Image (cartoon, rainbow, N blue to C red):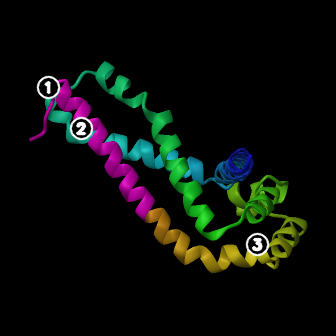
């Protein structure tokens, strides 16, 4: 009986932790998309991919091969998203991320991200009010740490993409060595 009770308690704890992790991941992913971070990494992906194509220019790799290699973009974006969510979890709670989502999905938040010069007085007031909250203060105080983490994530992620594409090209008989 004790074994069954222990098993049930362990199962409930595991489900609870998984649910919290899943909720955090979903909220952080929304935040990354709303605040422009995800789009920024899509730009980085395109830039890294273009650099790889430029490095292999002399090998006359067919466009179809590049198109095939580029189909890994969703997988690469999923990988960087997981790393970014993990970085967020080092600095922000689920409540913080939900508060950020409230701001970033609002009209004022979207204007702040897309065209700060178009902010109205009302928008500025709403944004100022947010940055006076505990979450807003946490965003400001974590900027340096987040910037460092984001740089490491970018570097490793681009390195992983380069390695993956390089291996696939070498498997097809193309090598820059």
Hey, which quadrant is residue 137 in on the image?
bottom right
Which label belongs to residue 98? none
Which label belongs to residue 166? 2
Q: Residue at x 58, y 49 (%)?
A: 38
Secondary element type, mark 1: loop
Position of residue 174 in the picture relative to residue 36 (left or right): left
Mark 2: give few (<14), some (14-19) or many (20+) Cα within 10 Å.
some
Hey, which quadrant is residue 101 in on the image?
bottom right
Is there a contact, CB below 8 Å, between mark 1 and mark 3?
Answer: no
Q: State whether residue 53 appears in this view.
A: no
Mark 3: give few (<14), some (14-19) or many (20+) Cα within 10 Å.
some
- In magenta segment, residue 80: no
Q: Residue at x 55, y 70 (%)?
A: 146
For the view shown, which residue lies furthest in the front direction?
Answer: 1
Q: Which residue is mark 1?
A: 173
Q: State whether residue 150 appears in this view.
A: yes
Q: Earlier in the sequence, mark 2 or mark 3?
A: 3
Which label belongs to residue 135? 3
Magenta-tinted stretch: 152-177
Is there a contact, CB below 8 Å, between mark 1 and mark 2?
Answer: no
Residue 125: x %, y % from top left = 87, 72
Kindly report the distance in space between the C-alpha atoms of the residues bearing marks 1 and 3. Answer: 52 Å
């Amino acid at each position: 009986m004790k074994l069954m009770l222990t098993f049930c308690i362990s199962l409930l704890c595991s489900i609870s932790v998984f649910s919290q992790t899943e909720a955090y991941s979903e909220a952080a992913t929304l935040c990354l998309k709303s605040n422009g971070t995800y789009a920024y990494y899509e730009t980085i992906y395109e830039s890294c991919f273009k650099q790889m194509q430029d490095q292999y220019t002399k090998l006359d790799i067919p466009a179809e091969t590049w198109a095939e290699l580029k189909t890994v973009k969703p997988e690469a974006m999923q990988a960087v998203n997981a790393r970014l969510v993990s970085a967020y979890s080092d600095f922000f709670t689920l409540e913080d991320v939900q508060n950020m989502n409230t701001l970033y999905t609002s009209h004022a938040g979207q204007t702040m991200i897309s065209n700060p010069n178009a902010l109205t007085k009302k928008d500025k007031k709403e944004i100022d009010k947010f940055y006076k909250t505990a979450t807003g203060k946490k965003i400001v105080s974590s900027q340096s740490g987040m910037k460092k983490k984001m740089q490491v994530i970018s570097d490793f992620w681009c390195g992983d993409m380069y390695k993956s594409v390089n291996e696939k090209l070498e498997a097809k008989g193309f090598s820059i060595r």
